[in-house]
Amino acid sequence: MQLDSLISILPELNKAFFETIYMVGISMIVAIVIGLPTGILLFVTDKGLFMENTSFKNIVGFIVNMIRSIPFIILLIVLLPLANMITGTTIGPTAASVSLSVAAIPFFARIVEQSLREIDKGVIEAAVAVGASPWMIIKDVLVPEAKPGIIQGITITVISLVAYSAMAGIVGGGGVGDLAIRFGYYRYDNTVMFTTVIILICLVQLFQLAGDRIARLVDKR
């Protein structure tokens, strides 16, 4: 009986899979567009670096830490009005992408900052010594040197977003998590629950393998 129920929801399962990819994709793009420069600024404004600005770093660092300290399920609910203002609704994958993006930005920014900290300070000092502008140092030194770490950071962020997207199902965000709750949990159908878990595991493994391979390819060290 449970196998029959699984077959009957295959169209829903297919839709939920692509909704998860959609949510994760939008959130990751936003995280890269905003989180990457935020992480770079957190690094270059640190004490002793070429764009030192303690006030800026403290303010931005506080905001980043504040958002990261909020459990995602609470952040998801708190940001429903913002999602409604941006998308015109509080349900569905597009609305859920708002909360996912807000959670992903500070998470990715800190990973970028940490990746930049692993760069040999001598390389940065050499660039400053030859008179390179801050933009040139960022573009031609920092980002290329930290590229493998940033790629790994993207991988970690994507995997976290897959987990967060499953939580979005609690508030009708769509995706695999929503399917697990509606067809698995509410109907006490373990087959559906196990299937959604397997799908999420496969997604995570796929993203991890792809991220590791790309990071190795761009690593020239």
Image (cartoon, rainbow, N blue to C red):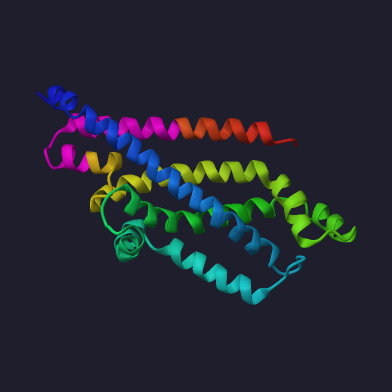
Instruction: Specify the quadrant of the image occupied by residue 162.
Output: top left
* Quarter placement of the C terminus: top right
The image shows residue 22, relative to residue 130, as above or below, that is above
Q: Residue at x 90, y 58 (%)?
A: 130
Is 202 colored magenta in this rendering?
Answer: yes
Please report the bounds of the magenta region as a residue range: 180-205
Residue 196 rendering spot, x and y as whole percentages: 28, 34
Nearest the camera: 108 or 85?
85
At a point 59% along the width and 42% down the height, the residue shown is: 151
Q: In the current view of this chain or complex, which residue is farthest to the front?
A: 88
Q: Residue at x 58, y 41 (%)?
A: 152
Q: Main secondary structure of the magenta part?
A: helix
Residue 7 placed where, x, y %? Answer: 18, 23
**As rendered, which of 167 and 99 lies closer to the eye?**
99
- Decide which of 99, 191 is in the foreground and name it: 99
Farthest residue to the right: give it. 130
Q: Position of residue 11 (x, y in %)?
A: 23, 29
